[in-house]
Image (cartoon, rainbow, N blue to C red):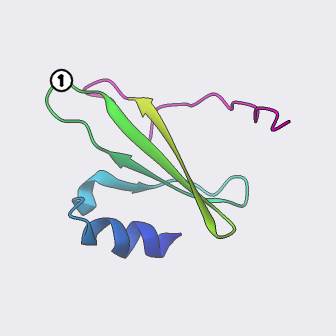
Amino acid sequence: MWAVADSKLPSLRYPAARIHRMPDLSGKSVARLDVRVGAGQLALEVTVIHNSVMVQAFGAPEGVSVTEVLLKQQPDRPTS
């Protein structure tokens, strides 16, 4: 995962100051990407699970660090 956060995202021109590693609490690698521009509140949480990547969008108001926002866990939807 940290290869994604440390090399892949900057190579896509995301500024390193907007990429935040998150604590590894569940055995998954997690980083947050601050994509707020102007009055926008968009941020992304990127989680690596095995060989897949899951991205969750969330809002982060101006003046609040994306690392401070607490996200509710959402149960997986049934697939059948």
What percent of the width, then of the height, locates residue 76?
76, 36
Q: Report the amino acid beneath label 1.
A: Ala
Residue that appears at 24% across and 59% down? 14
Q: Which residue is mark 1?
A: 39
- Of residues 62 and 45, the one drawn nearer to the viewer in this rendering: 45
Q: How dense is the environment of label 1, judged by Cα within 10 Å: few (below 14), some, or many (20 and up)? A: few
Most extreme residue toward the front is 80
Residue that appears at 86% across and 36% down? 80
Q: Could you say which quadrant of the image residue 65 lies in?
A: top left
Q: Image check: 59 left or right of 41?
A: right
What percent of the width, then of the height, locates residue 55?
51, 47
- Asked whether residue 66 is in view, the answer is no
Q: Could you say which quadrant of the image residue 71 lies in?
A: top right
Most extreme residue toward the right is 80
Majority SS type along the magenta span? loop
Count of numbered marks: 1
Residue that appears at 54% across and 31% down? 70
Q: Could you say which quadrant of the image residue 41 lies in?
A: top left
- Of residues 78 and 24, the one drawn nearer to the viewer in this rendering: 78
| Stretch in magenta | 60-80
- Asked whether residue 14 is in view, the answer is yes
66 part of magenta stretch? yes
Q: Image check: 76 left or right of 43?
A: right
What percent of the width, then of the height, locates residue 60?
36, 28
Q: Is residue 49 above or below residue 33?
A: below
18 part of magenta stretch? no
User: Label 1's element?
Assistant: loop
Residue that appears at 57% across and 54% down? 23
Most extreme residue toward the left is 38
